[in-house]
Image: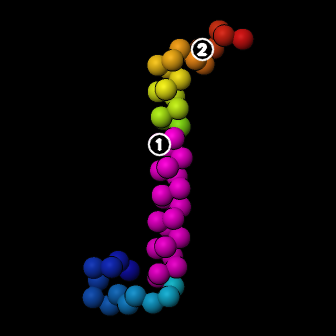
Amino acid sequence: MFPFVWEWVWDAGHYMFFGGMWYVLIILSVGLNWCIYKALKDTKEGKGGGHGDH
């Protein structure tokens, strides 16, 4: 069921599920943003050459 359905009841199970879901989504988004930031920073500084850079 969805929160906008009238039969929805906020009990401990729902709090734990949604808390865990948001925790995982936040961790993934922080990690993804960190990788994008590092890639842009390294590209700007000229680090991390292409495939021919061995």
User: Eyeballing the image, is 47 above or below 17?
Assistant: above
Q: Which image quarter is the C terminus in?
A: top right
Q: Is mark 1 on a helix, strand or loop?
A: helix
Q: Residue 42: x percent and y percent?
A: 53, 23
- From the viewer's side, name the closer residue of 9 and 47: 47
Residue 17 included in the magenta stretch of the image: yes
The spot of residue 12 in percent (x, y) is 50, 88
Q: Mark 1 packing: few (<14 Cα in 10 Å), some, or many (20+)?
A: few
Where disc 2 sits, the SS reads loop
Q: What is the quadrant of residue 11 in the picture? A: bottom left
Which residue carries the number 1 mark?
A: 33
Magenta highlight on residue 53: no
Rendered view: 11 above or below 34: below
Q: Which residue lies furthest to the top in this view?
A: 52
Which residue corresponds to the image point at 54% horizontal and 46% vertical from the top-left?
Answer: 31
Q: Residue at x 49, y 49 (%)?
A: 30
| Total marks placed | 2
- The color scheme shown is rainbow
Residue range highlighted in magenta:
14-34
Alpha-carbon distance for marks 2 and 1?
21 Å
- Judging by the rendered image, the residue that carries numbered circle 2 is 49
Q: Which amino acid does label 1 sit on?
A: Asn
- Does 19 sit above or below residue 5? above
Q: Which residue is drawn at 65% across and 9% down?
A: 52
- Residue 48: image x %, image y %? 60, 19
Residue at horizontal 51%, vertical 76%?
17
